[in-house]
Amino acid sequence: LPALARGLSTSAFPSKLAFAFDIDGVLKQGKYVLPQAKRVMQLLTGRDGRLPEPVPFLLMTNGGGVPDAQRRALLSRDLGIELGENQLVQSHTPFQAAMREYIDKPVLVIGGDGDAARKVAESYGLKKAVIPQDIIHWNRSIWDRYHFTDEDEKVVRHDIDFNFTPIHAIFVLHDSNDWGRDLTIVNELMQSRGGMLGTVREDRTVQKPGGEVPLFFSNPDLEWASDYPVVRLGMGAFSLSIASVYKAATGLDLPFTQIGKPHHLTYEFADSMLTRHTKQLRGVDQDLNVYMIGDNPMSDIWGANMYGWNSILLRTGVYAGGEPAHAPTFIADDVELAVEWAIKREL
Ligand code: G3P
Ligand code: MG
């Protein structure tokens, strides 16, 4: 690449080129940051001087569980750059609009350890975010296998009496750290009378349109790649578990809203964020030719293809070779080779 880019004038560089990077299996493997990722960030931000100008990019993950600003700070430290406000889409970031309807209403939020989900919800303005431990604290019998801890005691809220207060919506923001507890609570609420805990609607086998508690899932990944030798179960496995228990109990399909890659809403949200970032970077509105670089054919590649972006599938994550379920524009061994291929292709 140095030879390719050296001496290139800004006018000769493909100014519409932009990137969307998946995180797990592309930039990181579990807690490990890939060295190729750090070099790519130095290249695209212009810090290593090998390109005539910075190239717009953002990170787009089905992960989450911490407020966006906090995750940007953590990723900036990992990657050795400064991510701006328009350079990260987490699984739940597009939920901000849907959450505006529930600012002052009790809403159950699930995902991560302790009160992580409440912190995410409050970063989006929710004032009455409820976590599963609040409900256990209200009535231990709801899932008597759960051992309420001193840590739980430190984070629960005591200002909501669930004997008289319904739950108005459920947002699953990140991986549950207790599937039995959370699957039980979600299934009870989805079969309840208007979101009142401790109740069941008059006929469990009948679903009145609009009568259910609105349920939102932020990440459909059945599997994902961490630093473990084989793929791990993701939030999609959790939502499948909830849906199969609900079906067994009621004979009905679970009603819910799903976002996250490969869904259109997440790509549309990322596209508008990337446009805002490019305007901040260059001061002009610009059509972009985006390359999505990911490791999961069922999320990154499928979603990019449906949205009309270029897609590059890597061998550093979920994809383990063979014919991928969704055909990418290109397959590369790692993120650095992928970026170099895209730049050469656009020159
Ligand atoms: O929990 C995160 C996992 O589902 C996938 O994350 O960054 O590969 O979209 P990512
Ligand atoms: Mg990934």
Image (cartoon, grey):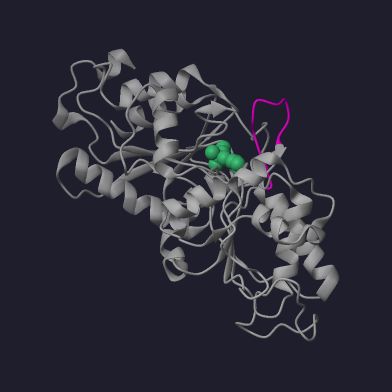
Q: Write down which quadrant ligand 1 falls in.
A: top right
Residue situated in front as seen by the camera: 34 or 85: 85
Q: Quadrant of residue 74?
A: top left
Q: Is residue 345 above or below residue 197?
A: above
In the rendered image, residue 230 lying in the magenta stretch gets the answer: yes
Q: Position of residue 235 (x, y in %)?
A: 66, 49
**Residue depicted at x 42% and y 43%:** 68
Q: Position of residue 127 (x, y in %)?
A: 46, 61
Q: Is residue 80 left or right of residue 320?
A: left
Q: Is residue 17 above or below residue 125?
A: above
Q: Is residue 252 above or below residue 60?
A: below
Q: Which residues are magenta?
A: 222-231
Residue 261 in view (yes/no): no
**Residue depicted at x 32% and y 22%:** 43
- Number of numbered markers: 0
Considering the image in quadrants, where does the C terminus appear? Answer: top left
Q: Position of residue 57 (x, y in %)?
A: 34, 37
Residue situated in front as seen by the camera: 202 or 267: 202
Considering the image in quadrants, where does the N terminus appear? Answer: top left
Q: Quadrant of residue 80?
A: top left
Q: Quadrant of residue 49?
A: top left
**Residue depicted at x 15% and y 46%:** 284
In the rendered image, residue 9 lying in the magenta stretch gets the answer: no
Characterize the magenta stretch by its predominant secondary structure. loop
Residue 110 in view (yes/no): yes
**Residue depicted at x 36% and y 43%:** 290
Q: Position of residue 288 (x, y in %)?
A: 29, 46
